[in-house]
Image: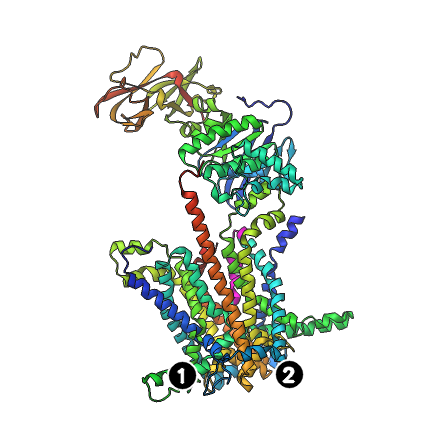
């Protein structure tokens, strides 16, 4: 797993202060990004947040209104897509319907005027790579959604470019197919070894394939980190609210000692893990977040003396059995409703009657402080 | 650099129309103020052409032609718009375009042939009279079908009915398909659905189509000259006659009046209905 | 839309009415055919069916000449108007502010033929005067003939007339094209032109050919503008009209009219049939793919 370190030489993709305006609308505000060669990099974010705009700026389908794009150290901002060392896979409708699979895949090589037999050999190699050997003669409308995306992959990879861009490639597929394709994409990237940049709004998809994830929302690059880090220790409040299911409290940071931050929330003090730079935020408004699976339900206050346990009082509302997990809804004293997750129909928890008084507790080290 | 040139080439059509459509049209005003010479005209500023037109005998006939064209519009609407509604409602999406092609068919035959062929159809000894007499519905030929305002109206309706169907069809694209089902579900009668829901939604397209027919009815000289009675004129015919008579300022005056009437109607329509909505299906 | 509870009679009546209107609109055309097959010409008491007039039509020098001129005009107009309409459609797709373009492109539809022809006639006469003066000044002789009434002016008038129709037809055709394919082609290394010619054009080809057919038919049928702007030569419609109004139509003219109408009907009819067949093929394909076991 890549840690995101640049291993000697220029990064495969670098954007410097890149931005895009459409008239008065700012689709993307100054983004600085570095993507290393051979990484599987995911742009994750809500719809309309700018991640597709960023991808298209890298690919050359849009011109930046500010900043520049560098590929392997070269400024390519003024180059159209056919002159850049990127290839793209689209969401749907991108296969050429008047050509069969073989002609689609071989199109890029045909443009480069390679000899016929060379093209045929390469096409066959690519089809085998994506698991569609023997499909060369088929027409595009004869293929299922998953097969069409594989043809697109073959068509893009045949050019042996350094960087593959994928614009929500799995969005048109149904849930089960999407899960399978995620695994295939990951293996494909490991096999081929080039940089993949993948855009999606689906969090599970992002985590299944990525080495590193960049969260993009409201035209801004919110946070970039490895998969595990982004899920377990998000730095920004937005990321905490977007990735995974967390309960977030807003409060004021009172003190920091030994890596433990004390935040006052609704008049009570809560301890949480202080990140770097937390000390500079003393006295300022911050937020604290805890993952719902780290929350525990008790009938009475847990042994408060046990170090590290934080807890809140509330009333039990209901439980919703979702198969893999069960979500317990609890109404806090402030009136706010939160969710606590347990695995399976965990009988170790409760059962609690409606409106029973419960305590929601978590360990301080499972709580994160966000200064922004 | 190449991209710049390619970008400029895209403007070929608008530039062409600007040069050979907009400019001549606007210049008609300028020329209408010129004074007439033997074979041409000379730059001047006089209202003579306009005065000539408004005080001439032709003017009264011109006003009548407006009335006749308006009747044509109304008849076209009553006959043609229900077809557009019917096609939208009851014909499967894929077949709809074929129906439109069916209406393109008469349009594709020369207007000259269609208009002129009405003479033998509407005339004293023509098709209609022959059939009516043979069947026994009339004992004498009806003479008022041809060389009369009726003839002109029939000619205009026949020429322009396909356009109201097209305009109606385009207008109906603004009506979402499920509207019919919703109205039915709510218990609205067909008539109420039509008046309260369909008409307002389709209004921009209908208006545009009506303006088209009205203006063309006033402007196409062919129909009154072939089917109209003595003295039957419309703006187009007056303009054409003026040109033949080498009275160019007069022709320009009439053209200018027509062009500004047309622009005025479109402007009114736009304020009332926002005509740009008609074009949404295209984009 | 076609719900199961609608009375079939409503639908039947609708169709009958629709077809009746189309038939009524076509009455003059059919009457033309009827007359053209009559050996005794128009208005004669007897009727004998014959192909004579269609055969001799080609011997009528005047008519054939006019036909050839009109064909020439049609070809030239097509060569100019189709690329223009195509580029205008592309421009439309690119612009954010589209209203002015559409208004400009469609405005010629609303200006009646005679009015526009008069304006353009005067415009050309003025231009001709200017260019003649210019050619005298510069000594470049050919300039003086540029805007004389003739082929150039007729073609310009026809281009303005047909441009709106071409624009609409091409826009509708392009509406079915998915722009991601152009981007995918660019991503594979195609230049803008290659992407258009190799990927987009094959898919909009049918629409473009329809537009071409449209323009040819429109040119043949057009009377007013051509008659005013053409200058010395005769076109098909001008011959017909002058005969109609003056000498009466010759039997060959009816036959010629019949031919032109027949061509138009055949063209439109084939388009209808071809789209019907294509649709059946698409439906058959879709049924095949929808069968289980064909996927993944």
Q: Nearer the viewer, residue A239 or C250?
A: C250
Image mark count: 2
Q: Quadrant of residue B197?
A: bottom left
Query: x and y percent of residue A99 in the render?
Result: 55, 45
- Asked whether the viewer can see residue A16, the reply is no
Name which quarter of the figure residue C7 lies in: bottom left
Which of labels 2 and 1 is toward the front? 1
Q: Secondary structure at mark 1?
A: loop
Q: Chain of mark 1?
A: B
Categorize mark 1 by other alpha carbons within 10 Å: few (<14), some (14-19), many (20+).
many
Tag 1 residue: B145
Q: In the rendering, at what x and y percent does residue C94 appear? A: 55, 51
Q: Is residue A18 shown left or right of residue A74? A: left
Residue for badge 2: B39
Find numbered disc 2 in the image and state the secondary structure of the residue it sits on: loop
Badge 2 vs badge 1, beta-carbon distance below 8 Å: no
Subunit of label 2: B
Residue in view at x 52 percent, y 21 percent: A1
> Residue at the right extreme?
C139
**Residue A127 at least partly seen:** yes
As displayed, is residue A103 above or below residue C282? above
Q: Which residues are magenta?
A: C93-108
Q: Are marks 2 and 1 on the same chain?
A: yes
């Amino acid at each position: 797993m890549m840690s995101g370190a640049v291993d000697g030489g220029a990064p495969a993709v670098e954007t410097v202060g890149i931005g895009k305006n459409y008239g008065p609308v700012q689709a993307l505000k100054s983004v600085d990004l570095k993507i290393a060669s051979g990484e599987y990099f995911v742009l994750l974010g809500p719809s309309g947040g700018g991640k597709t705009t960023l991808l298209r700026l890298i690919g050359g389908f849009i011109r930046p209104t500010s900043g520049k794009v560098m590929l392997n150290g070269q400024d390519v901002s003024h180059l159209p897509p056919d002159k850049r060392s990127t290839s793209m896979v689209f969401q749907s409708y991108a296969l050429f319907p008047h050509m069969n699979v073989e002609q689609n895949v071989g199109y890029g090589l045909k443009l480069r005027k390679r000899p016929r037999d060379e093209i045929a050999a390469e096409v066959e190699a690519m089809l085998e790579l994506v698991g569609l050997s023997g499909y060369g003669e088929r027409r595009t409308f004869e293929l299922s959604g998953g097969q069409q995306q594989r043809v697109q992959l073959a068509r893009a990879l045949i050019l042996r470019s350094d960087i593959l861009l994928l614009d929500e490639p799995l969005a048109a597929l149904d849930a089960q197919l999407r899960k399978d394709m995620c695994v295939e994409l990951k293996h494909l990237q490991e096999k081929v070894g080039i940089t993949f940049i993948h855009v999606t709004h689906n969090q599970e998809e992002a985590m299944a394939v990525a080495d590193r994830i960049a969260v993009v929302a409201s035209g801004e690059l919110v946070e970039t980190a490895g998969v595990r880090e982004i899920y377990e220790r998000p730095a920004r409040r937005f990321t905490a609210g977007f990735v995974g299911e967390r309960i977030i409290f807003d409060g004021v940071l009172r003190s920091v000692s030994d890596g433990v931050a004390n935040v006052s929330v609704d008049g009570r003090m809560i301890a949480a893990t202080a990140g770097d730079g937390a000390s500079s935020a003393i006295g300022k408004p911050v937020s604290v977040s805890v993952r719902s699976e780290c929350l525990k339900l008790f009938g009475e206050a847990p042994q408060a003396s046990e170090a590290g346990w934080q807890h809140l009082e509330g009333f039990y509302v209901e439980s919703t059995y979702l198969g893999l997990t069960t979500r317990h809804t609890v109404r806090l004293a402030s009136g706010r409703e939160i969710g606590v997750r347990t695995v399976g129909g965990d009988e170790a928890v409760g059962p609690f009657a409606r409106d029973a008084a419960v305590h929601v507790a978590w360990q301080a080290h499972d709580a994160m402080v966000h200064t922004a | 650099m190449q991209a710049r040139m390619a970008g400029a080439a895209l403007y070929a059509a608008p530039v062409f129309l600007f040069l050979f459509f907009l400019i001549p049209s606007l210049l008609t005003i300028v020329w209408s103020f010129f004074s007439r010479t033997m074979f041409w005209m000379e730059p001047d500023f006089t209202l003579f052409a306009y005065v000539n037109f408004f005080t001439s005998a032709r003017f009264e006939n011109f006003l009548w032609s407006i009335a006749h064209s308006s009747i044509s519009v109304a008849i076209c609407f009553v006959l043609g718009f229900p077809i557009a509604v019917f096609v939208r409602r009851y014909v499967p999406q894929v077949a709809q375009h074929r129906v439109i092609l069916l209406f393109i068919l008469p349009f594709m035959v020369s207007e000259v042939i269609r208009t002129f062929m009405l003479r033998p159809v509407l005339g004293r000894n023509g098709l209609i009279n022959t059939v009516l007499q043979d069947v026994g519905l009339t004992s004498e030929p009806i003479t008022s079908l041809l060389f009369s305002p009726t003839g002109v109206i029939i000619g205009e309706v026949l020429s322009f009915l396909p356009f109201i169907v097209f305009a109606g069809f385009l207008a109906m694209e603004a009506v979402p398909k499920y509207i019919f089902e919703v109205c039915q579900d709510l218990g609205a009668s067909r008539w109420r659905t039509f008046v309260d829901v369909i008409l307002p939604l389709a209004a921009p397209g209908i208006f545009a189509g009506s303006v088209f027919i009205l203006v063309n009815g006033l402007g196409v000289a062919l129909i009154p000259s072939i089917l109209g009675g003595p003295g039957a004129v419309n703006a187009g015919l007056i303009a054409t006659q003026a040109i033949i008579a080498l009275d160019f300022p007069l022709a320009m005056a009439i053209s200018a009046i027509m062009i500004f009437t047309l622009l005025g109607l479109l402007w009114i329509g736009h304020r009332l209905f926002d005509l740009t909505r008609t074009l949404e299906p295209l984009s | 839309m076609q719900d199961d509870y609608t009375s079939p009679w409503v639908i039947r009546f609708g169709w009958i009415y629709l077809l009746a209107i189309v038939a009524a609109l076509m009455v003059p055309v059919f009457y033309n055919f009827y007359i053209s097959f009559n050996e005794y010409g128009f208005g004669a008491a007897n009727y004998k069916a014959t192909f004579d007039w269609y055969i001799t039509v080609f011997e009528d020098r005047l008519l054939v000449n006019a036909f050839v001129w009109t064909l020439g005009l049609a070809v030239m107009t097509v060569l100019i108007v189709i690329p223009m309409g195509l580029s205008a459609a592309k421009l439309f797709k690119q612009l954010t502010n589209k209203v002015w373009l559409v208004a400009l492109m469609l405005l010629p539809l609303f200006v009646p033929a005679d009015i526009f022809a008069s304006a353009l006639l005067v415009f050309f006469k003025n231009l001709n005067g200017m260019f003649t003066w210019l050619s005298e000044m510069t000594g470049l002789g050919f300039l003086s003939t540029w805007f004389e009434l003739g082929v150039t002016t007729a073609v310009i008038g026809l281009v303005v007339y047909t441009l709106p129709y071409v624009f609409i037809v091409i826009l509708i055709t392009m509406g079915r094209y998915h722009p991601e394919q152009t981007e995918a082609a660019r991503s594979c290394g195609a230049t803008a032109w290659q992407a258009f010619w190799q990927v987009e054009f094959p898919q909009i080809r049918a629409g473009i050919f329809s537009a071409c057919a449209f323009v040819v038919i429109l040119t043949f049928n057009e009377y007013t503008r051509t008659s005013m702007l053409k200058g010395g030569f005769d076109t098909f419609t001008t011959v017909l009209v002058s005969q109609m109004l003056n000498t009466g139509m010759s039997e060959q003219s009816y036959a010629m009219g019949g031919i032109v109408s027949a061509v138009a009907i055949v063209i439109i009819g084939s388009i209808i049939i071809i789209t019907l067949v294509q649709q059946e093929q698409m439906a058959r394909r879709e049924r095949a793919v929808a069968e289980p076991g064909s996927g993944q």
